[in-house]
Amino acid sequence: MTQRPFNFSAGPAALPEEVLHQVAAEMLDWQGSGMSVMEMSHRGREFISIYEAAEADLRELLQVPSNFRILFMQGGGLAENAIVPLNLSRGGKVDVVVTGSWSKKSAAEARRYADVAIAADGASSRYCDIPAPGSWQLRPDAAYVHVCSNETIDGTEFHELPDLKSLGSEAPLVIDCSSHQLSRPIDWSRVGLAFGGAQKNVGPSGLTLVFVREDLLGQALPICPSAFNYQTVAEAQSMFNTPPTFGIYVAGLVFKWLKKFEYAGKQGLAAIEQRNIDKAALLYAALDGTDFYENRVAAHCRSRMNIPFYLRDESLNEAFLAGARERGLLQLKGHKSVGGMRASIYNAMPLEGVQALVTYLKDFEKRHG
Ligand SMILES: *Cc1c(COP(=O)(O)O)cnc(C)c1O
């Protein structure tokens, strides 16, 4: 088997090769059923077994407490920007911490349903730093506080979730963890609701994971669509309407891959987290070790998943990308809103992929520096 290229896409992003092989092998006949998973009733025993295993494995991997419900929804992260206020705002106040492009979008969408205030805004650092939680302006009667725990475009990450109680707020914390979910554990004691589109680090697009604390169910606004009412979805085990069955199946295989994953003497989520730490450290060290490239994010909040960087001489951008493609290093172009380059190194990216990128960075600098 020839080696596939290393794919640095920000999303939809690379999946573990083993998972893709299993999906291919089972495409026409899932485990002797005579059906593809795409052709099965979501209420039949075959799919129910897929669903139940996926939910149990996900709960185990992330140590999700029993007072949280896991919902398998559709609509992606952007739909959740509306679905969360429809369910949790009670038409009242919502505080949003703006740390980059995605949280800015969340604030704008929530404004359609709630009284939104920006608790802090990292604009003055050009979103290269996360404002310290102690400086946030939190309203005592906010229905919830929204943060994006990993800003996919700007390349910042909360390495510790804010403890709202210690900041004097009783409001539940909502996190958009689309681009780093399952890359590290989540401190559930600090979270009321977490959501994320699957296509960055979990599976195919079309599936959205929602983790919601039970006491937050049952508060949806009357205008909330039934299919997006968390309580309705939770009561129906995510089958109020047809769930994204194929996405749940592929995500379930990714969960099994993660549970077995071994690295540096560890297993499961601890192992993948350690590999993510090592991959990110390798790439940041290479970028920091030269003036030819530059990452602008403050060291304490650099993302392990999305690493934007710039060539000091931007006239070399096209040559850089073409040379990368020739070496099998794909989709390194930065987001159009910020330019430059971006390496997304999600769970499925092996250490060898980052090593190959680092070697290319050095070779390109030698040729053009
Ligand atoms: C990609 C992304 C989204 C948007 O997700 P869609 O599935 O395209 O709606 C939202 N938030 C974050 C942090 C993302 O990375």
Image: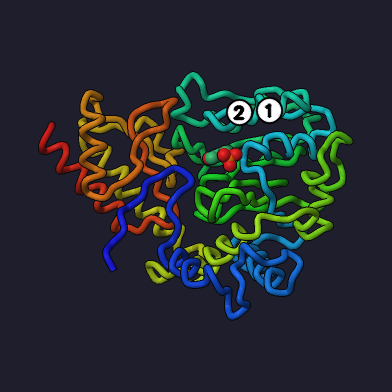
Q: Position of residue 221 (x, y in %)?
A: 86, 35
Amino acid bearing label 2:
Lys
Left or right side of 116 for 19 = left
- The residue lying furthest to the bottom in this view is 32
The residue at 52%/25% (across/down) is 122
Left or right side of 325 for 305 = right
Q: Classify mark 2 as within 8 Å of ligand 1 or not, answering yes or no.
A: yes
Residue on which the image places disc 2: 105
Q: Nearer the viewer, residue 220 or 25?
A: 25
Left or right side of 1 for 10 = right
- Above or below, 105 relative to 231: above
Q: Position of residue 234 (x, y in %)?
A: 80, 55
* Quarter placement of the N terminus: bottom left
Residue on which the image places disc 1: 109
* Quarter placement of the C terminus: top left
**Residue 166 can be seen in this image:** no
Q: Position of residue 149 (x, y in %)?
A: 56, 41
SS at mark 1?
helix
Q: Position of residue 346 (x, y in %)?
A: 44, 51
Q: Are marks 1 and 2 in contact (CB under 8 Å)?
A: yes
SS at mark 2?
helix
Amino acid bearing label 1:
Glu
Q: Write down which quadrant ligand 1 falls in.
A: top right
